[in-house]
Amino acid sequence: MHPVPVPENPYGNLYIYYLSGKFGSDNRFDPATYIGNWEEGDFSFLFFTRPSKNLVEKAIDGKTSLQLLDHYHMTYDQWHGDEIVPIRIGDFTITPPWYETGNGICDKTIILDPGVVFGTGTHPTTRDCLEALHLAFEDRTVRTALDLGTGTGLLALAATKSGCRKVLATDLNFLAVQTTLRNVHLNNLSNQILVAQGDAEKFMDFTFDLVVSNIHYDVMKNLIQTKGFLKKKRFILSGLMHSEAECIASELALLPLRIIQRWDQDGIWHTFFGACDQD
C-alpha cells in the first residue's frame, strides 16, 4: 500500500473554545469553518478551522448560562496525537478520505473521516474490537449488530464490511452522531447502518445478534444488567482498564454466558468477546 495524499487534509488547524454550560447547536456559524460542538457534562467545546473568538463571544452574549472559559489553538495532528494516515488492521484498511490507497476501494477498505472525534483505529481497544468482530462473524450466525458509543462509526462500518446486514450505531454525543453519519455516507452504507442519538441503555432491549460496547465503565456496568443483554447471541465489551475489567468479569461470571476470548493489552486495556447461552 503506497498512500498518495489527495487532497490536503481539511483540518490543518483547530481553534477550540471551551465553555461552561450546554451550548447546543447553532446554525449561525459558517459550516465551512465550524466543525461542531462536543458536550461533556455541563461543558461545551466548539471546534473551528479558523480563529472564531469574536463569533463565539457574540453567540453567547446575553446568555447567562454560558461563559467562555478558555480557548486553544493546535494542529489537527496534535489533537489526535499523530498524523491521520491509512493504516492496516487485520483484514481492514482504514483510510481518511484525503488519501488514496493506490489499490482502489475494496470490500475491507473503510473510509474514515474522524473529524475531531476520537476513534481512528489506533487505540488498543479499537484494534481488539476489530479482531473480536472477525471472530464474531466467522460462523456466519451474526446478521445484525448494535454498536453502543459508536464515536466515529468505525466499528459499525467494520461490522457491515464483515457481512452484517443491519447495524444500529448509537452515541449520546451529537457531534459523534454527525461524524458517524458522515462516515456512513462516505462508505455508501446508508441502507445498512442506522445512526441514532441517545443513552446506550435505551437501546439494549432492541433485538440484535451482536452488541458491541467500547464505552465508559460507568455505562457498561449497567448495560450488562439489562434483560436485553442476555438476549444477544454475541457481545464485545471493551474500553476497560484493569480494575474495571475485573469488576465486569465478576459480574459476567454470575450470568448464563461464556467468555470466548479476553484481550489484555499490557495489563492496561481489556476487551471481552463472548456468547450468551441461549441456544
Image (tube, rainbow, N blue to C red):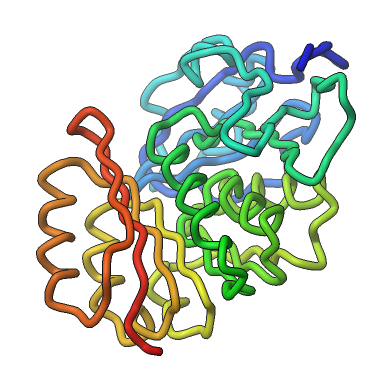
Quadrant in which the N terminus is drawn:
top right
Q: Which residue appears farthest toward the front when viewing the image?
A: 139
Please state which of residues 16 and 52 is positioned toward the viewer in this rendering: 16
The quadrant of the rendering that contains the C terminus is bottom left
Location of residue 72 with respect to 180 vertically, above or below = above
Q: Residue at x 44, y 49 (%)?
A: 22
Q: Is residue 276 visible?
A: yes
Q: Position of residue 213 (x, y in %)?
A: 41, 58
Q: Quadrant of residue 106?
A: top right
Residue 81, given in percent of the width and then of the height, sits at 46, 15
What's the residue at 57%, 61% (across, down)? 138
Q: Is residue 147 left or right of residue 202?
A: right
Report x, y in % for residue 67. 40, 35
Q: Residue 273's image quarter?
A: bottom left
| Residue at the (89%, 30%) spot, across then down | 104
Q: Say which residue appears at 51% left-offset and 84% top-offset.
A: 206
Q: How many numbered tags mark residues here?
A: 0
Q: Is residue 138 above or below residue 205?
A: above
Locate residue 57 relative to residue 248 in the image: left or right.
right
Closer to the camera in the image, 160 or 16: 160
Q: Is residue 73 visible?
A: no
Q: Position of residue 86 (x, y in %)?
A: 68, 22
Q: Nearer the viewer, residue 65 or 178?
A: 178
